[in-house]
Image: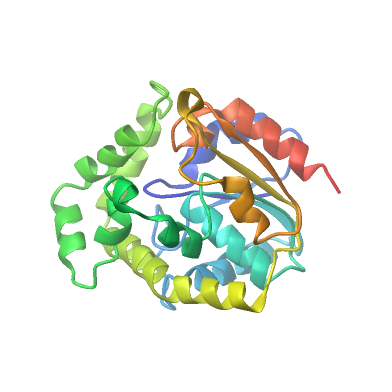
Amino acid sequence: MLLLHGFPETRRCWDAVVERMAPSFTLVRSDLPGYGDSPPSRAGHSKRTMASSVLQLTRALGHERFAVAGHDRGGLVGQRVALDHPEAVNHLAVLDIIPLVDMWESISADSALPAYHLIFLAQESDLPERMINCAPEAFVDSFLDGWSVVQGAISDNARKAYHRAAARPGRARAICEDYRAGATVDLEDDRSDRAAGRRIAAPVLALWQEPDGAPAPFDVLSVWRLWARSVVGSGLNCGHYLPEERPAEVAAALASHFATR
């Protein structure tokens, strides 16, 4: 099983899930290109390029066919691996994310403020990088604290790891390039695939945040059913960081889904 993290985290976000799943699964955790300890991609940071990178990694480790679980940006990479390389992916799980074209089309006056980072980080100038580099820890904490609701779910060690990663040279640029791709080439790739009727062949599990039962701003299952032949899923009582806020439930859901045929 390949585990892919989201923004602004690293592979460490899966720590508590890995503890629960390691006895039963072979697990591979990877920092996305330009995040954590992974160098920025020389070929760019489109999700198609990132998908090729993680596919090369799994093949180098001897895994020609595998399951993918991706949180946030990692879910977008997982979507692209499953679409572009259906022979390699037997199951897909996407955590608190929908495809980029649907995400952009869902933004309204009510949702624009909470989703401001999509627009800010995608700016073509180097202003976002300059601002992040002035206060990388404050930048990371604004999202960790603003998007989580389970007190203490993000450990001090994990938080420090995210701080160190964000402060490393070139990391702010890679993060912004990820979001710039998400507003341009990734969006066009999704539009093209949707117009062509391309669908994910692997069964999909979708999990999303429902803090205290508050519904998501869109029908997650309906969105993913436009992209895949088989989709199941549910909301969890937590914020955005499902692997850290609800690791036991995430691990159980992944194990159950990946055991299906």
Residues 234 and 38: in front is 234
Q: Residue at x 21, y 47 (%)?
A: 136
What percent of the width, then of the height, locates residue 134?
Answer: 13, 52
Q: Is residue 234 above or below residue 135?
A: above
Residues 137 and 97: in front is 97
Q: Is residue 192 above or below residue 169?
A: below
What percent of the width, then of the height, locates residue 39?
Answer: 40, 64
Q: Residue at x 47, y 29 (%)?
A: 214
Residue 156 seen from this side:
yes
Question: How many numbered marks, from 0 up?
Answer: 0
Q: Would you say 8 lies left or right of 69 here?
A: left
Q: Residue at x 18, y 69 (%)?
A: 126
Q: Residue at x 55, y 69 (%)?
A: 53
What percent of the width, then of the height, locates residue 258?
Answer: 76, 44
Q: Is residue 185 above or below residue 226?
A: below
Colouring rule applied to residues:
rainbow
What percent of the width, then of the height, locates residue 189?
Answer: 52, 75
Residues 230 and 86: in front is 230
Residue 22 seen from this side:
no
Residues 209 and 255: in front is 209
Q: Would you say 69 lies left or right of 137 here?
A: right
Q: Would you say 25 lies left or right of 141 here?
A: right
Residue at the front extreme of this rendering: 109
Residue at the right extreme of this rendering: 261
